[in-house]
Amino acid sequence: MDDASVIVDLTVTKLADVMQYCKPKEQFVLVKKFGLWDGKEVPLQQIGNEFGMTRERIRQIENQALMRFRRLIINNDKYLKVIEVAKDMLHAHGGLMSRDKLISLIVDTKVTEFNGQELKIVLLSDFDITPLTRNRILENCFYIDPLHEKLISDIATYVHDYFINQGNPEQNIYEFIDHVKNEYEAKHPNIGYLSNNEFYVNLFDVITEIAVFDGFIGSGKSAKVNPKTIKAKILYVFSVINKPMHYQEMTNKIIEFFPGKAVKISTVHNEMVKSRDIFVNIGLGIYAPKSRGFIGGVVKEILVRVMKKLDRAAPIKEITQRVLKEKMVSPNTILLNLHKYKELFKKNEQGYYYLAKGVK
């Protein structure tokens, strides 16, 4: 059948139904590869195994199918509208975006009824929007002219090598963008996207083994830019909220700062309890990081430490205030300890307490 003679009305025809005009193998490859029927994408190698063909042969069939698909819907207003929106979005975001981010933004605009799986095949069938397939350095993404694959790959390789192979520490993302600009902007004066910070932000997002978080970029193995463990997330929350916190409040903050993954209160509490070299229990379920000067210990030990710093007799009110900065306990508990350990703590005629001589 001549593709040009087929008129497809996408206002009444589902995108998957267009596949009936493709050859059987083309139809099978597109439907499987893009999950058009069940939403489950099947790798080319697996499709090849079903046909008894190589992965490369299946890729050739996919390319032929995409060309045929494009010819079938090229003049359809619904298709053209989606492509126009996609190109506008790419231009507004620095010329490059991850595949999933671009598709998600298009879906959010509600300019089309195409779902995410259908949009993948629509975008891949266009000539103005270029896909960059996942490889060793880059995740799946789309870009538009005058960007080109060699330039994108060169910059991505430079960034990857800078943090992974050379082992440079994390850097402020915008300072690093200026650094990369100095390397490439002057070499390609006709590519305006290279002066756009958003191009670099989106590119960093699709470079494998690189992570961006809280204004910093670095190796994905760095807890500062890719805090995966509960301990790393607790430390991040403490770095943002500079105060001791109850483990329940800490759990809520982790969920707020790292949405999308459930966190149990018991998990957070257990991590803070077992990591005594990092976190200090200052009483009543409240913890603080040792790096902020919190030392912890039982009330007796804290009293000795406080009174050594004072190096003078002090009223119970002042002593209590200083102890409560390190451990949340009842003032009566502090007074009981002062009375209980008379070999450590002495009281003068004014009722002030001081540390006995020779106490280490």
Image: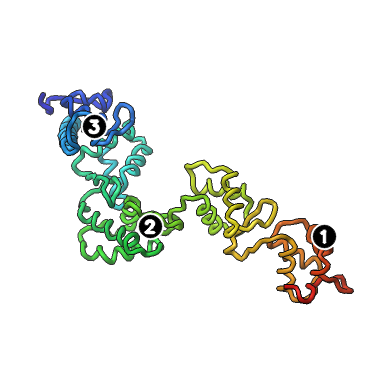
| Distance of label 1 from label 3 (alpha carbons) | 76 Å
Name the image colouring: rainbow
Horizontal side of residue 206 vs 68, given as left or right:
right
| Dot 3 crowding, Cα within 10 Å, few <14, some 14–19, many 20+ | some
Kind of residue at badge 2: Ser
Residue matched to label 2 = 219
Q: What element carries label 2?
A: strand
User: Considering only order in the chain, which callout, 3 or 2, is on the residue closer to the N terminus?
Assistant: 3
| Distance of label 1 from label 2 (alpha carbons) | 52 Å
| Distance of label 2 from label 3 (alpha carbons) | 34 Å
x then y, percent, for residue 307: 74, 71
x then y, percent, for residue 351: 87, 70
Kind of residue at badge 3: Ile
Please tell me whether residue 16 is drawn above or below residue 103 in the rendered image.
above
Answer whether residue 74 is visible to the viewer in this image.
no
Could you say which is closer to the camera, residue 127 or residue 269?
Answer: 269
The image's mark for residue 336 is: 1
Taking the spot 70% from the left edge, 52% from the top edge, the residue there is 284
